[in-house]
Image (cartoon, grey):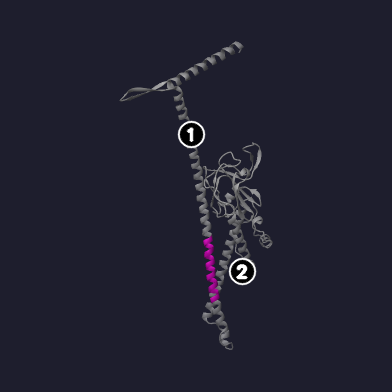
Amino acid sequence: MDKAQVKKLISRSWSSAKEVYKTFVFFIKQCLGSKKIVIISEKGISSLPVSFKFQAGVACGFLAFMLWVSYSTGKYFAYEGIISEKDREIWSTNITNENLQYKVADLHDNLAELNKYFDNIRRMDKVAAKKVFEGDASDSDNAKVADASDYNTVSKAQEGANGVQNILQNIRGKVLERINSLESIIEMTGLKVEQVALSNEKLKRVFIENGSSSNQGGAYIPLDDEEFNNMDFDKEVGYLMQLEKVVYSFPLASPMKHYWVSSRYGTRVDPIKGRAAMHAGIDLVGRYKSNVYSSAPGVVKRAGTYGSYGRFIEVDHGSGITTRYGHLNKILVKKGDILERGDLIGLQGNSGRSTGTHLHYEVRYNNKSYDPEKFLTAGKYVF
């Protein structure tokens, strides 16, 4: 194709574009050309001119309104989807909690049954001792022949002892099962059991060397009488109570009821500088001024403006665990306040070094950050 043909093609394209433009302008003028609004009243007929600019402004405003309605509708359905998903998670969590409550109730029933067996054994022992040692020791008949009531008493005592042994084995099995469950929950958070629970050297020696540590499993097989009696059951119960206390203080509850995660823990591109940076927490986005709750029992360590965090709260949960809540719109607690899990502490906002409304949430152990999502995942198996 030579230059003349190229110029001719360009000229035709330009002419076509002009025609399209003229057609578009003609259409706009026909639709938005100068118009008059006729007003008929008792005093007569009057007209109100409507200019092209006014009509164009109204059309642009209407278009902007429709775009806003479309955007808001899309966001609404998106939030509805998030809320539905969270409701399903809450339902699943409630089912898990109910199962745990049934297990605890079963354990309490076993303890009550055990106390009843012990009372029966003590009563039977007294009756047996009285029948054996009372009476005339020189009476050979009494020394050699036991009557039917003695035999029945001993048999009942033996049955009671066997029942007690079965209950003890059942209780110990449930204690070990609960220990294993709590250790698994701690491991899910990214922490090690020996970091937060086994600070006592004696407990380390008893439970790590004897094999009662994490990363174990399998069916529970009761020990025989001799093996069971040699185990220090009191120490196992003490260890269980220690684990229960640690897990209770863990930040396993969600700091917001409805949210989506806009930025996760770890390396990311900094939203302001655009460079690779470490993100020490997760960013949770919900409706503007959404409620922010304490994720575990604790004491408010800081409450106020704190550098790039903006309006900021830090809560100390004990055992070296702290949580941080940044970019708040409003702080509803003060330093030294004692909190329970789920207490309202602030409102989500956009203060500090932030590009939009959200909650920056951190979990720290001994001032080192850990992934909060792992704690929230572990919490689904507790609450």
Taking the image as shown, residue 10 lies to the left or right of residue 26, namely right
Could you say which is closer to the camera, residue 217 or residue 286?
286
- Give the residue at x 46% y 23%: 53
Taking the image as shown, residue 190 lies to the left or right of residue 98, namely right
Which residue is labeled 2 in the image? 225
Q: Residues within 10 Å of mark 1 (few under 14, many from 20)?
A: few
Q: Is residue 236 magenta?
A: no
Q: Is residue 105 above or below residue 313?
A: below
Is residue 88 visible in the rendered image? The answer is yes
- Give the residue at x 50% y 18%: 21
Label ID, residue 68: 1
Residue farthest to the bottom, as pictured:
138
Give the residue type that dot 2 points to.
Answer: Asp
Rendering coords of residue 352 (x, y %): 60, 42
Rendering coords of residue 35 (x, y %): 40, 21
The number of discs equals 2
- Give the residue at x 53% y 77%: 153
Which type of secondary structure does the marked residue at label 1 adopt? helix
- Mark 1 to mark 2 CA distance (whole Å): 75 Å
Q: Residues within 10 Å of mark 2 (few under 14, many from 20)?
A: few
Q: Is residue 144 above or below residue 310?
A: below
Rendering coords of residue 208 (x, y %): 67, 59
Rendering coords of residue 267 (x, y %): 65, 42
Which type of secondary structure does the marked residue at label 2 adopt? helix
Residue farthest to the front, as pictured:
43
- Give the residue at x 56% y 70%: 162
Q: Is residue 112 magenta?
A: yes
The region drawn magenta spans 104-123
Is residue 218 visible in the rendered image? The answer is no
Give the residue type that dot 1 points to.
Answer: Trp
Q: What secondary structure predominates along the stretch shown in magenta?
A: helix
